Amino acid sequence: MRIDAHQHYWKISRGDYGWITPEITTLYRDFLEEDLVHHLKSCGIDKTIVVQAAPTMEETEFILSLSERSESILGVVGWIDIDNPSYKEQLETFRKNPKFVGIRMMIQDMPDENIILSSHYLEAFSYLEEIDLPVDLLVHSSQLSAVCELLNRVSIRGVIDHIAKPEIEQGKLEPWKSQMAEIASHPNIYCKLSGMVTEANHKNWKKEDFIPYVHHIMDVFGVRRVMYGSDWPVCLLAASYDDVYHLLNDTLPSYVSKEAREWVFGKNAIDFYKLKHIKEEEQA
């Protein structure tokens, strides 16, 4: 089974996507399953993981409701309010839904990323470690020092979204390169090869811009801890769905065999999000 491990759906009228303003004309409209399915089919993608795009419980409920009547949505990565004393109860409510597969921490939007090292957050991360819940980490490359320190203190099942948003347009590799190698030394941490085109020049990117970044991620994480994600529709700011799919195919190192690509384009997402029923269905 081939999986896009990172994409979004939204309905603007819901009112909780504060970052999508009318000035961002490409994104300021509804994006739902019917807008994506033909792209999935053209690229041979069977299922997707839908990831939250707003820091509200209501938005997670919305995408879960979409998943319940969808054939293409394999799982939903939602959001909970860690600052609310009832976050465990919030989480347990979502976990009753079989399509709920994890949560995302939006470190990128925190006024100070070091909040994740506070006692309150460390307690929450320890709880997530205890229940082995998959956690997406949305983080910018400038915030990686805090993430490195966090992973020295807790052993969560985590995945770095968008290869931590390095400065691809500037061609800057360090300290991102060294910090990602340090993060990869933690065996429970994966990385999504996603969200790269929007970190490059939106109008004039070329395949060669991404090769050093993709190759480094593959070298330090290995073929069993990386996964393809389109970041659709955000990717439309710089590239079509098909462009993103083919870009990753064209920039993977030559040592990534056809068999290994099946891990990148599906099997790793099944393992990370603990979708055992999918494995059983494939083996049946």
Image (cartoon, helix red, strand yellow):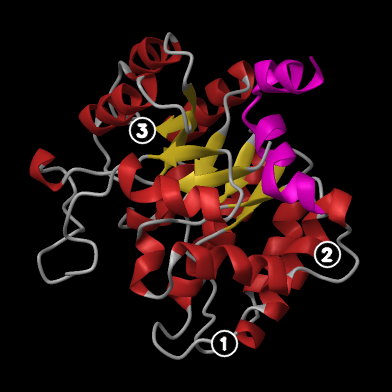
Q: Mark 1, residues whose alpha carbon is within 10 Å: few (<14), some, or many (≥20)? A: few
Mark drawn on residue 79: 3
Q: If you read the primary sequence from the N terminus, does the residue marked by circle 1 or circle 3 appear first? A: 3
User: Given the image, on which type of amino acid does mark 1 rest?
Assistant: Lys
Q: How far is mark 1 from mark 3, CA to CA?
A: 34 Å
The x and y percentages for residue 14 are 12, 39
* Element assignment for label 2: helix
Question: Quadrant location of the C terminus?
Answer: top right
Q: What residue is pinned by disc 2?
A: 219
The x and y percentages for residue 151 are 65, 44
Quarter of the image where one finds residue 90: top left
Residue drawn at 18 percent across, 69 percent down: 24
- Residue 202 higher or lower than 117, as above or below: below
Query: Would you say the magenta stretch is mainly helix, strand or loop?
Result: helix
User: Given the image, on which type of amino acid does mark 2 rest?
Assistant: Asp
Q: Mark 3, residues whose alpha carbon is within 10 Å: few (<14), some, or many (≥20)? A: many
Residue drawn at 32 percent across, 31 percent down: 63
Q: What is the magenta range?
A: 261-284
Question: Quadrant location of the N terminus?
Answer: top right
Q: Which of 173 and 37 is in front in this view?
A: 37
Mark drawn on residue 206: 1
Q: Is residue 123 left or right of residue 212?
A: left
Quarter of the image where one finds residue 201: bottom left
Q: Is residue 106 visible?
A: no
User: Given the image, on which type of amino acid does mark 3 rest?
Assistant: Trp
- Residue 274 higher or lower than 245, as above or below: above
